[in-house]
C-alpha cells in the first residue's frame, strides 16, 4: 500500500525537529560545562574551593577514623554548625561593605548571659528574655553605625572597643558565680540539643531547591526570549536541578539513618536563604554590593550610603545575638566562657572560607553555610582523633590563609579579564 507523500514529509520533518532539539540540548550541556571552565579561568571560582576542601577533609578524616562519616556524628556536626553559622551570616553583611565586626563573639556571649540572668535568675518568661537580648543586639549595631557614619571611626577600632566593653558587661551581669544552668526540659534547650525534623518533612524540603531552580530558570528564559537574548537550554537547566535534588536527597537519606536533620540547622539554612534572597533580589541587596564595590560611585548614583552601613551593622549584631542564644541552648548554660575563644575566628573565617571577599563588593549568604561546615568538620575530625585544640587553631588558621590567598589571586584574575 502506497503512503501519502505529504504524510511522509510531515513525519520526516518531525524526526528532524526532534533530532535538532536533542542536538541543541547536548550543545547546551556542553556549553554549560565550557562556561563553567571559562568562569574558573577568569577567577570566578564560586563555591569550587569549598567543595574541593570538603572532599579532601572528609577523605582524610574518614580514613583516619571511620566514625567521622557516621550519620550520628554528622548530625552532631550540624548542631554545632548552626550556632556559629548564624553569627557568620551577620559577618557577611559587613564584609560585603569591606568592613569588619570584631565583637560578634562578645555580643553572642553577652546575649547568652542576658537570657540566663533574666530567665533563670529573675524568673522572666524565656520569650521576653530573648526579646530583650535581641534589642540589646540592635542597640549595639546602632552604636557602631553611629560611630562610623557620624564620627568616621573605623569599624575595626569601634568593634574592637565593643569587644572589650561587651565582654566586661557579660562578666558583670553573670556575677561571681560565672555560670547559669538552663533547664534541660525547656523548649529552648530541647531545640538546641535534641529536636529533629520528621523524615518526610526533611525529604520534602530537599525537593524545594531543585523546583525553585527550574521555576526561576523557566521564568528567566521567557524574559530573555521576549527581548531576543540568548537563553539557557531547558535540558541544561533540568540536568542541574536533578543533580542538585539527587545530592540533597541522598544527604537527607544518610542523615536519617542516624538521628536526622536538626531543626536548629534548618533554622540556620532558612536564615541563609532569606539573607541570600535579600542580597540578590532586593534593592537593598544591590545597594549593599554597590557600596562595597565603590562607595563614592554608589553615593553619586543616589544610594543612601549611611543607611546601608546602618543596616549592615545592626544585622551583624542582631544575628550575633541570635547565635549566642542558640549557643546557650546548645550548651544548656550561660557562662563567662560563652562567646570567647575561637568564636570570632570561626565566624569570620567561615564567611571568608566560603567565598566572601575581604575586599568588599562580593559575597553570598551561602558562604557562611559552606564555610562553617568546613571549620566544624576540621574541629570534629581532630576531636575524634583526640588531638589537642592547638592543632585545630593552627589548621583553621592555615585554611583561612589559603582562602584569603585564593580570593586575592581570583581578584587579580578578574581584574586582568576586566571583570572586577
Image (spheres, rainbow, N blue to C red):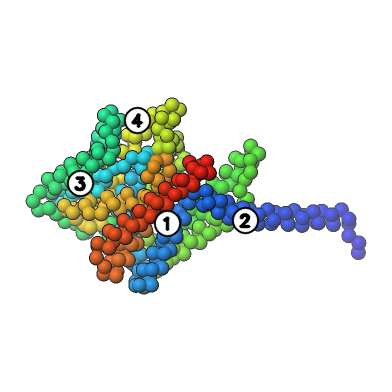
In front of the other: label 4 or label 1? Answer: 1
Q: Is residue 146 visible?
A: no
Tell me if residue 381 comes above or below residue 241 in the rendering: below
Q: Quadrant of the N terminus?
A: bottom right
Measured as percent of width and height from the top left, residue 103 is found at 25, 44
First along the sequence among labels 2 and 3: 2
Residue occupied by mark 1: 50
Say above or below: 201 vs 277: below
Mark 4 or 3, closer to the camera: 4
* Of pointers 4 and 1, the one earlier in the residue sequence: 1
Q: Is residue 154 left or right of residue 217?
A: left
Identify the residue shown where x is 23% and y is 58%.
331
User: Mark 4 vs mark 2: which is more N-terminal?
Assistant: 2
- The reply to whether callout 2 and callout 1 are in contact (CB within 8 Å) is no
* Residue 351 in view of the camera: yes
Q: Which residue is mark 2?
A: 30
Q: Secondary structure at mark 4?
A: helix
Amino acid at each position: 500500500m502506497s503512503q501519502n507523500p505529504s504524510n511522509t514529509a510531515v513525519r520526516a520533518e518531525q524526526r528532524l525537529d526532534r533530532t535538532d532539539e536533542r542536538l541543541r540540548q547536548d550543545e547546551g550541556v556542553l556549553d554549560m560545562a565550557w562556561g563553567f571552565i571559562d568562569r574558573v579561568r577568569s577567577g570566578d571560582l564560586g563555591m569550587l574551593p569549598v567543595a574541593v576542601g570538603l572532599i579532601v577533609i572528609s577523605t582524610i578524616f574518614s580514613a583516619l577514623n571511620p566514625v567521622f562519616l557516621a550519620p550520628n556524628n554528622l548530625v552532631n556536626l550540624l548542631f554545632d554548625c548552626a550556632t556559629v553559622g548564624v553569627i557568620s551570616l551577620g559577618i557577611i553583611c559587613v564584609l560585603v561593605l569591606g568592613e569588619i565586626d570584631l565583637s560578634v563573639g562578645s555580643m553572642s556571649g553577652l546575649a547568652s548571659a542576658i537570657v540566663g540572668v533574666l530567665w533563670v535568675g529573675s524568673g522572666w518568661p524565656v520569650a521576653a528574655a530573648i526579646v530583650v537580648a535581641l534589642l540589646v543586639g540592635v542597640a549595639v549595631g546602632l552604636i557602631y553605625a553611629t560611630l562610623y557614619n557620624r564620627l568616621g571611626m573605623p569599624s575595626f577600632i569601634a568593634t574592637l572597643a565593643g569587644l572589650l566593653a561587651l565582654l566586661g558587661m557579660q562578666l558583670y551581669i553573670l556575677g561571681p558565680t560565672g555560670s547559669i544552668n538552663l533547664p534541660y526540659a525547656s523548649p529552648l534547650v530541647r531545640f538546641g540539643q535534641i529536636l529533629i525534623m520528621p523524615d518526610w518533612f526533611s525529604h520534602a524540603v530537599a525537593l524545594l531547591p531543585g523546583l525553585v531552580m527550574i521555576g526561576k530558570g523557566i521564568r528567566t528564559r521567557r524574559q530573555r526570549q521576549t527581548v531576543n537574548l540568548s537563553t539557557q537550554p531547558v535540558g541544561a537547566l533540568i540536568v542541574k536541578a536533578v543533580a542538585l535534588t539527587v545530592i540533597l536527597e541522598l544527604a537527607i537519606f544518610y542523615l536519617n539513618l542516624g538521628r536526622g536533620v536538626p531543626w536548629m540547622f534548618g533554622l540556620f539554612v532558612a536564615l541563609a536563604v532569606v539573607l541570600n534572597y535579600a542580597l540578590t533580589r532586593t534593592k537593598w541587596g544591590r545597594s549593599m554590593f554597590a557600596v562595597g564595590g565603590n562607595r563614592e560611585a554608589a553615593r553619586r548614583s543616589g544610594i543612601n550610603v549611611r543607611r546601608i552601613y546602618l543596616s549592615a551593622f545592626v544585622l551583624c549584631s542582631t544575628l550575633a545575638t541570635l547565635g549566642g542564644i542558640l549557643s546557650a541552648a546548645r550548651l544548656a548554660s550561660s557562662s563567662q566562657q560563652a562567646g570567647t575563644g575561637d568564636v570570632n575566628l570561626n565566624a569570620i573565617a567561615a564567611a571568608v572560607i566560603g567565598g566572601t571577599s575581604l575586599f568588599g563588593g562580593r559575597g553570598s549568604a551561602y558562604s557562611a553555610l559552606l564555610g562553617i561546615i568546613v571549620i566544624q568538620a576540621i574541629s570534629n575530625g581532630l576531636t575524634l582523633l583526640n588531638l589537642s585544640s592547638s592543632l585545630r587553631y593552627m589548621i583553621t588558621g592555615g585554611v583561612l590563609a589559603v582562602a584569603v590567598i585564593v580570593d586575592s589571586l581570583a581578584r587579580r584574575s578578574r581584574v586582568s579579564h576586566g571583570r572586577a
